[in-house]
């Protein structure tokens, strides 16, 4: 008498196989998101370093330029305006400083230091899981 052949285990994995497949897929999804974040972080780091170096160089050069121009203007205007030239220079530098900070704020708001693709994928993952 022939014994009935046992059904292969690979046809339907069952609960343990399903959980293992889910864990494997979840791990693959997590690894792809980590790789995407790493790529974008490298780009953000490069942009942030470039911004910081240019900002530092600009500050040093601006200090020298401001110093020399201020001394020249004050020296040439002192016989005519006296102490009022110091007030005028202070007001001018205050306005210029405000303009520079406004410009820097606009650069940051452009999103040069964000990770749009990673955040979009994480939002999609979040929506898919809920």
Image (spheres, grey):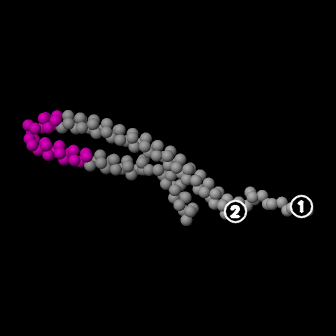
Say which residue appears at 38% left-offset and 49% top-offset.
108
Lateral position of residue 2 relative to residue 116, left or right: right
Mark 2: secondary structure: helix
Q: Residues in magenta?
A: 71-97
Residue 70 falls within the magenta-colored stretch = no
**Foreground residue, 88 or 97?**
97
- Please tell me the numbered disc located at residue 100: none
CA distance separating discs 2 and 1 = 27 Å
Lateral position of residue 99 relative to residue 24, left or right: left
Magenta stretch, main secondary structure, is: helix
Residue 75 falls within the magenta-colored stretch = yes
Residue 62, quarter of picture: top left
Relative to 120, residue 82 above or below? above
**Tag 2 residue:** 14
Residue 11, quarter of picture: bottom right
**Foreground residue, 116 or 87?**
116
Say which residue appears at 28% left-offset and 39% top-offset.
59
Residue 102: x and y in percent read: 31, 50
Residue 54: x and y in percent read: 35, 38
Q: Are marks 2 and 1 in contact (CB under 8 Å)?
A: no
Lateral position of residue 12 relative to residue 118, left or right: right
Q: Quadrant of the C terminus?
A: bottom right
Residue 2: x and y in percent read: 89, 61
Relative to 72, residue 119 above or below? below
Say which residue appears at 16% left-offset and 34% top-offset.
72
Q: Mark 2: few, some, or many residues within 10 Å (few <14, many ≥20)?
A: few
**Tag 1 residue:** 2
């Amino acid at each position: 008498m022939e014994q009935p052949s046992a059904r292969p285990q690979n046809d339907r994995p069952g609960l343990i196989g399903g959980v293992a497949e889910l864990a494997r897929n979840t791990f693959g999804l997590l690894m792809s998101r980590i790789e995407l974040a790493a790529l974008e972080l490298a780009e953000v780091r490069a942009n942030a370093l470039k911004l910081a170096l240019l900002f530092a160089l600009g500050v040093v050069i601006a200090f020298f330029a401001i110093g020399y121009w201020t001394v020249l203007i004050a020296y040439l205007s002192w016989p005519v305006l006296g102490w009022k030239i110091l007030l005028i220079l202070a007001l001018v530098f205050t306005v210029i400083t405000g303009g520079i900070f406004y410009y820097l704020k606009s650069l940051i708001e452009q999103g040069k230091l964000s990770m749009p693709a990673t955040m979009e994928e994480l939002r999609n993952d979040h929506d898919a899981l809920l």
